[in-house]
């Protein structure tokens, strides 16, 4: 041992008890099972022990389709925000964006796991013996046309003003939906929403403060903010359009019809704009393709490119090993 | 099971709880699962120890590790077939951090959370910095500045003392 660094620590970065001196390299012992490294350090079910029985009178397929919509919103928006990591204007904002992305990723994981539990037929099949958990299969092994997120979530990142404006719009809309979702008859969705409300309250305040700061800052910062809002506004209306699945789960008492929250979300946005001294952009809604939009699986090109980037490693290693 | 026959139910639960109290948060190692209020319930079902935990934040990467560590501690304490369950409701709140936990945070230079906001009706929009009764963990001054509502872990905000200039972390009220 005299010629080797003799480092003994109680925990490594993954929290696993290791004594480095006894191992060949610094990474052994880091993982519970090295073979599964491609998909993270463990395969625990995020809903282990949670009662995932579908409430009476609810079509499990519709519940799953709805959870997939909400899960895809969170996943795709999280991935976009995560692209800011190490690119933000200062360390505090970098950390804030990473935290927001992480909260959304946690919500996505639970929502996708809930979708899979309600309707296992949704989950893509992988080779026999693949250890990839259901929520990861949904994230990494579906094609772009199978994603059900609103198109706002996939908009490519612009400058920091665009990030602030986008997070404000997303979290204002989403918070209004999640506040109502806390009384869902599906206890799993209600619990996910309850947690999400607490987290997204911070996101909305963060973004709202930055919108104010940029609007009242310099001519340059204000111009950038207005340009960003102008570019995003065509996607505002889509957030409040009711998809048949949403209408159906709302009628069953497990989901929310987004049209219901349009007024409330609009009031909040107008409050921020009034405090910032700016007006709502005058832009019409971005059309769909033959009337089909994000919730129908029709997206902008940006989603396909993002998925190519996000899914490439998982798809090369569907058995989770290399 | 073996444990149930060798000791009383209460003693087994106490021993399992003690095992859980040895598991620390990998990101805030001064806190145990019990200090954090993450451990919700310890019971024995059909002779097996069942522990229920509630995640702090939806995406907290420390949760998986804490769960693995808990399973390992329980195994070492003689409960190889213990089960760890997740309970999502009610959602975790910083109010569940124990007195011991708050002392441990202070001792490590981290400002403990105040009382979590209780909400009636829609979540209010707050465009001014959050007001908290935070004091500098080094000099005790109340003259502090919020430098970011987000910190190095999901649960913390960052502050700086304007008197002694010490930067410090504050566990957010949630």
Image (tube, rainbow, N blue to C red):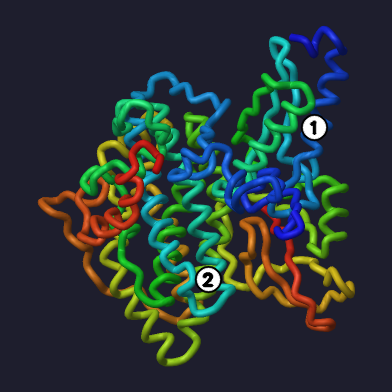
Furthest residue toward bottom: A219
Label 2 sits on a secondary structure element that is: helix
- Report, in whole angstroms, how far the alpha carbon at label 2 lies from the one at label 1: 37 Å
Q: Which residue is mark 1?
A: B19
Residue A94's disc number: 2
Residue A50 shows in the view: yes
Residue plotted at (30% across, 45% down):
A315
**Where does residue A263 sit, x and y in percent of width and height?**
39, 56
User: Does residue B60 appear anywhere in the picture?
Assistant: no
Q: Residue at x 26, y 46 (%)?
A: A295
Picture coordinates of residue A279, whole percent (x, y): 37, 77
**Front residue (pair A132, A139):** A132
User: Which image quadrant for residue A264?
Assistant: bottom left
Q: Chain of mark 2?
A: A
Q: Residue at x 37, y 86 (%)?
A: A223
**Above or below for A254 versus A171:** above
- Please give the chain letter of the residue carrying mark 1: B
Q: Position of residue A178 (x, y in %)?
A: 48, 46
């Amino acid at each position: 041992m005299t010629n080797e660094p003799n480092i003994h620590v109680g925990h490594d970065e993954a929290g696993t008890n290791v004594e480095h001196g006894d191992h060949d390299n610094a990474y052994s012992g880091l993982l519970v099972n090295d073979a599964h490294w491609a998909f993270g350090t463990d395969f625990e079910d995020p809903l282990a022990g949670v009662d995932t029985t579908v409430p009476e009178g609810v079509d499990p397929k519709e519940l799953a389709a709805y959870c997939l919509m909400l899960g895809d919103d969170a996943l795709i928006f999280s991935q976009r925000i995560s692209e800011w990591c190490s690119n933000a204007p200062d360390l505090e904002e970098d950390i804030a964006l990473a935290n927001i992305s992480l909260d959304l990723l946690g919500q996505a994981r639970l929502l996708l796991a809930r979708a899979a539990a309600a309707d296992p037929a949704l989950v893509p099949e992988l080779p026999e013996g693949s250890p990839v958990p259901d929520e990861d299969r949904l994230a990494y092994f579906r094609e772009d046309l199978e994603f059900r997120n609103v198109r706002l979530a996939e908009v490519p990142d612009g400058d920091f003003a665009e990030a602030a404006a986008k997070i404000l719009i997303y979290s204002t809309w989403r918070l209004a939906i999640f506040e109502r979702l806390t009384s869902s008859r599906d206890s799993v969705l209600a619990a996910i929403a309850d947690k999400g409300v607490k987290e997204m309250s911070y996101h909305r305040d963060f973004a709202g403060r930055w919108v104010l700061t940029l609007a009242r800052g310099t001519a340059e910062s204000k111009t950038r903010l207005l340009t960003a809002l102008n570019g995003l506004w065509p996607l505002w209306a889509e957030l409040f359009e009711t998809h048949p699945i949403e209408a159906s789960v709302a009628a069953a008492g497990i989901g929310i019809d987004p049209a219901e929250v349009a007024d409330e979300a609009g009031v909040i946005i107008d409050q921020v704009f009034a405090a910032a001294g700016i007006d709502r952009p005058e832009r019409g809604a971005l059309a769909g393709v033959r009337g089909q939009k994000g919730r129908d699986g029709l997206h902008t090109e940006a989603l396909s490119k993002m998925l190519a980037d996000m899914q490439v490693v998982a798809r090369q290693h569907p058995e989770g090993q290399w | 099971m073996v444990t149930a026959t060798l000791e009383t139910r209460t003693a087994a639960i106490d021993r399992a709880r003690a095992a859980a109290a040895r598991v620390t948060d990998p990101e805030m190692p001064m806190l145990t699962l019990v200090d954090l209020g993450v451990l919700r319930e310890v019971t024995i079902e059909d002779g097996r120890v069942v522990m229920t935990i509630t995640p702090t934040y939806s995406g907290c990467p420390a949760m998986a590790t804490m769960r693995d560590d808990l399973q390992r501690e329980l195994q070492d304490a003689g409960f190889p077939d213990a089960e760890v369950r997740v309970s999502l409701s009610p959602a975790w709140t910083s109010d569940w951090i124990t007195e011991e936990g708050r002392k441990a945070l202070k001792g490590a230079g981290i400002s403990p959370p105040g009382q979590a906001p209780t909400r009636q009706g829609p979540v209010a929009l707050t465009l001014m910095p959050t007001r908290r009764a935070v004091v500098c963990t080094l000099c005790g001054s109340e003259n502090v500045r919020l430098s970011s509502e987000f910190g190095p872990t999901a649960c913390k905000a960052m502050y700086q003392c304007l008197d002694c200039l010490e930067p410090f972390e504050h566990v957010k009220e949630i």
